[in-house]
Image: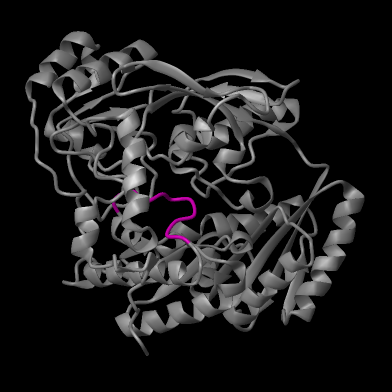
Amino acid sequence: MPRIPDERPLSPQPGIIDELRRRLPTASVLSTPAELAPYECDGLTAFRQRPMVVVLPETVEQVQTVLRLCHAARVPVVARGAGTGLSGGALPLEDGVLLSLARFNRILHIDPDNGTARVQPGVRNLAITEAAAAHGLYYAPDPSSQIACSIGGNVAENSGGVHCLKYGLTVHNILRLTLIGIDGELFEVGAEALDSPGLDLLALMTGSEGMLAVIVEITVKLLPRPERAQGLLAAFDSVERAGAAVARLIASGITPAGLEMMDNPAIRAAEAFVHAGYPEDAAAVLICELDGFNAEVSFEVMRVRELLLDAGATEVRTARDDAERLNFWKGRKAAFPAVGRLSPDYYCMDGTIPRRELATVLKRIEALSEHYGLRVANVFHAGDGNLHPLILYDANVPGELDKAEDFGGDILELCVQVGGTVTGEHGVGVEKLNQMCVQFDSDELTQMHAVKAAFDPHGLLNPGKAVPTLHRCAEFGAMHVHHGELKFPELPRF
């Protein structure tokens, strides 16, 4: 898997830096090596590339100025939020402008009567909930990085979180976007009402990874705090039993607010890191949260406890109070940094599968781990089948990063083979371009490029990301269409 976007001719325009300095405040334009170094990657640190220049506008008008200049000079632009993305979506271009929205960090208005908030894209996810708390409201999507990630980046990647099973992804929790096209034109999609006439451009823009326009304002939905939230933690002696328990629980008709799973390596890492009280001898744990009215939660807690025990749980704990419930989540939300204690490096994957395939896929990942000789810790949103295998490797050992990338690619292709998809919430970026060739055929990819061209005819907004070229797919060798059906490449046999 390459560590740079699809190859394309470079179009260096050093003169644009002087033009940007003339049009923007001096402190808003960064161009020295020391200034550019912090922007050379996002959360996927294996992919690195310094931009030609970084700009940090403070007003909508300044963003329009930057985009108009780049449009006229045919200079590519990569928009960046907090840089916490895990797919290389904000990887800059050496001949391009990196447009940081970090200074767009104001909450513009909270409307408690209608349950909405207007915010700028650089506002932290958690800051929205903190600002709405005084009104008894909160913003539901809560990625593990919510303390740092920006809402603009959440929209660009259609982020989820531990509560997306019940409350949905970002696309289900926003109402309106204000955007700027590559030509500097300001426009809006969506509405503060529940529906608006015309095509659903709000859904199109959500998850478009900065390829169609630059977001400058977002109207989000705010929800009332539930009367009660109750957490349970169930331990299992095998990951297969835990996976089967997930399918059984969802089939019962109960929709938890969150349903997360961690295997033993992730359990041990999280426990050593935050001391959440996890059973370290368990092969897997499920963390289940139920919320709603008090009587409703009381009934569901007893029902879920019974279901989990019947499904083979060796232990089921019910949080005694809110502090213990939050402690259950503390370990889960710290799992990614905690796994960093197990290995010098790890590669975080993101794929989604049908819940019925959970046990099968986990067993196959274990076999792939043995095949590649690399350990893996599994942390994922079990309720909606969104997997986050963390592949452990050492970048200082020659060839280990390549093996980790191949291992990750096999996991994503496995997700497609069982009826899933190559991403759940991290986006495609540059990381999953090859696996997009596996999931989609040439006609589908052509249509995606046509949508891109409708908004950005010169391909200047985040080029080389999210949608692979047909030439790349031909080279990857994963596109074998016979009578209109896509033949998936076989994974190694064991």
Which residue occupies the foreground of this view, 40 or 253? 253
Task: Classify residue 397 by image quadrant.
Answer: bottom left
Instruction: Kindly report the secondary structure that dominates the magenta region of the rendered protein.
Output: loop
Asked if the stretch drawn in magenta spans residue 425, the answer is yes
Residue 104 in picture, x, y percent from top left: 42, 22
Picture layout, residue 199 above or below residue 282: above
Does 233 sit above or below residue 182?
Answer: below
Q: Residue furthest right?
A: 295
Q: With respect to residue 216, does 173 lie above or below?
A: below
333 shown above or below 475: above
* Total number of numbered discs in the rendering: 0
Answer yes or no: is residue 217 visible: yes
Q: Residue furthest front?
A: 483
Residue beneath the point at 24% across and 11% down: 25
Q: Quadrant of the C terminus?
A: bottom left
Q: Which is more toward the observer, 454 or 172?
A: 454
Q: Nearer the viewer, residue 448 or 335?
A: 448
- Residue 42 percent location from the top left of the image: 32, 45
- Give the colour scheme shown: one colour
Q: What residue do we see at 89% from left, 49% from top?
A: 294
**Residue 167 is one of the magenta-drawn residues:** no
Residue 342 seen by the camera: no
Residue 478 percent location from the top left of the image = 28, 67
Q: Is residue 20 left or right of residue 293?
A: left
The location of residue 470, given as percent across then percent down, is 24, 53
Residue span colored magenta? 421-430
